[in-house]
Image (cartoon, coloured by chain):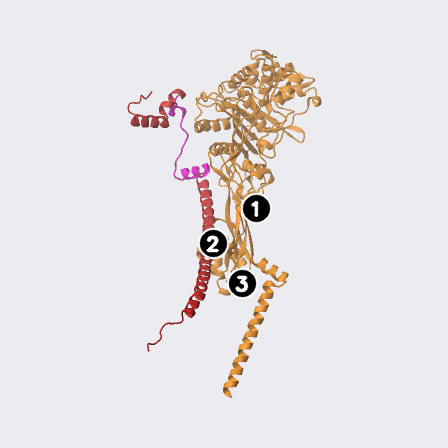
Amino acid sequence: MNDRRMLWRMALIIVGVLCVWTGLAVRLSFLHLGPNETLKERVRRIRHYERELVAGRGRIHDASGATLALDLDTKDVIVDPKTILANGQAQAVARQLSVVLGIPLSKVESRVNRPGRRYEYIKKYVQHDEFEQIIRMKLAGVFMEDSSARYYPHDSMLCHVIGFANLASDGCAGIELKLDRKLRGTPGLQVSERDGRRREIYEKRTVQIAPETGCDVHLTVDVQVQYVVEQALQSAVHEYNAKSGWAVVQEVKTGRILAMASLPAFSLNEYRRVHEEELLNRVIGYSYEPGSTMKAAVIAAALQERVVTETTMIDCEGGTWYYKGRPLRDFHPYGLLSVADVLKKSSNIGTAKIALLLGEKRLDTYLRAFGIGRRTGIELPGEEGGVFHARKNWDSLTITRVPMGHAVAVTALQMVAMYSAIANEGKLLRPRIVDLVTNASGEAVYRSEVEVVGTPLSLDTSRTMRRLLKRVSEQGGTARRARIEGYDVAGKTGTAEKVINGKYAKHANIASFVGFLPADNPELCILTVVDEPHKFTTGGRVAAPIFKEIAEQIVRYLGIPPGGWEYPMYAENGQDTPAGSTVP
Amino acid sequence: MARRTRKNRKKRGNGVKLHAPMIAVLALAATVFISYLWLCGRCQDIGTLIRKMEAEYESSQRRVKAEEFKWSRMKSPRNIHIYLSRHNLEMSWPDEDHIVRIPIDERRAFDSDVITAEFDLARTHPEHPNE
């Protein structure tokens, strides 16, 4: 009897177990094979793994290969206050994070002591060394998320040229903005499935697109030259308690910009704290009345047109001359001066009379051929074209005012390009600051070349002008302070009163000097400008010494011999005659 | 009468014929199954290794970038100037009279590549005239 009952019980248990298993099997079959799309989709979504592989921006290098801008992988440090407080470690964690991250202890404590919160930022964009230290500490409740940020190793150096990219990796100024599309990388993609611990299952990876880093940009600028320029400019602005200052160095025969500095400057790594005024690159974005530096262009044009020769005598009227009822004055009174001396002594009256001999039409044509009134086309955003009114809008005095650098506004870059043209056998070159752009595999995608924009002067006139401008730095000239031991310097000083509220201000000057060296075989053209200097206000007293300080060091650094290089530094794109317009 | 020990040949033959293919199939299935399991495990191992190496590569790249940043910052002209000043060192570029300039036509004689090439040529071909 007992045996039979036992048998029944066993059978019942077996049937029960079978029923349960069958039920489970049926449910499983339904789940897997049934038409339960919502559930399937949910599972698929949970298991789906998709990760965008961040592609960094390309780097920016100088001419010597020094890195000026690069992307760094950083981490955001986050805490889980609930976990930390539950462990009773709030004080210890806050103290350690404060020491490593350099944040005040009270600030970290205020973030950690937030019961109920599970996610609090402590610091964003933490650099490698710091986050490695935090990882090593193994603090419970402290975790990190990947981030990336743009960094500039040279801080404020070249700030106006490089510009900056924001946290979203968008170029916002300078080269970062101008070449944003090239610098920006293409992100990669990984599509796969994840396991129960939310880790990617490699075997299930179906898509793997590697990220492509953006192109690298190589500039023509040299950080050593830039440093020399910035130091000289900084000390001059400080010495003369000036409002601002700017300078540019260009290779005469190639148009390459070796340095471009503008003060006040700002730290590229802290661009969010910059004032708007500091953002302005005055070399390309500020138009000023150049003053006497404009005289060289007028005299060059007159010589080219054979209106005068260097020995033609001009009556400088003893310092004051009335034209159309308005007086024109010289800084020092002069009587008869040769054209060469008009330039050397910087006579306003002499230059105005030469311009009258040249005539409005030819004056206008030559200045435009020198690039006055239009952008140079340098690879930087925010370039101004200056102000040079159309000839039909000139009044009867304009022809006497433009030659002395009034009624016309130029940028420093236009002025340096003009003097480079005078120095470079009359060929006006497009200034260029980007030398090469290479892709992630190192292949060149863009290479800048010497570009002749026009030929406003002949070789003979260019040589004559070199000789005349060389005299300006000799004894009796206005640029004696620009002279360098062992080198012949050619150049011109400029002192212009600033226009404030529509009137020329007597006590607000712009002092400038633009020159090239070696005078007979020019290699470098340098322009220095100081805005509103005090104590001394003239170009010869304020700007020429900056030129000297810069040029003295650069010629040694670049190894330029006193007679210039023996061989040409570039080939003219294989052309016998340069492209571009020629003044008839 | 001798005891009959011989088995039925017909029966014996039938048994062997039935079992051999089945065993072969089972063995094959088992081999395939074990191979599949082994390959699956191996793939997982390799996948884990690849993921680990990918992470290591990314980490190394991060480190390289961080070091490059530090190096660039260290060798910036401003930093070098600060370090020199800290050690009371004043440096300037050489004066013109400290520089020996070699004319371009004489430069060939000082070109290290040319000297090395000529030295190699003289050593390998002693009879070869140098000029």
- Location of mark 1 (residue): A167
- Location of mark 3 (residue): A82
Q: According to the rendering, which colour does chain A have?
A: orange
Give SS at disc 1.
Answer: loop
Residue type at mark 2 is Gly
* Chain under callout 3: A
Residue type at mark 1 is Leu
Location of residue B77 in the rendering, given as x and y in whole percent from the top left corner: 45, 36
Tell me which chain appears red: B
Q: In this view of the protein, can residue A450 be seen by the observer?
A: yes
- Location of mark 2 (residue): B47
Q: What residue is at 66 percent from the left and 19 percent from the top?
A: A399
Residue A214 lies within the magenta run: no
Q: What residue is at 59 percent from the left and 68 percent from the top?
A: A27
Is residue A353 placed above or below A94 in the rendered structure?
A: above
Task: Report the Cα–Cα distance between label 1 and label 3.
Answer: 30 Å
Is residue A216 placed above or below A487 in the rendered structure?
A: below
Residue type at mark 3 is Lys
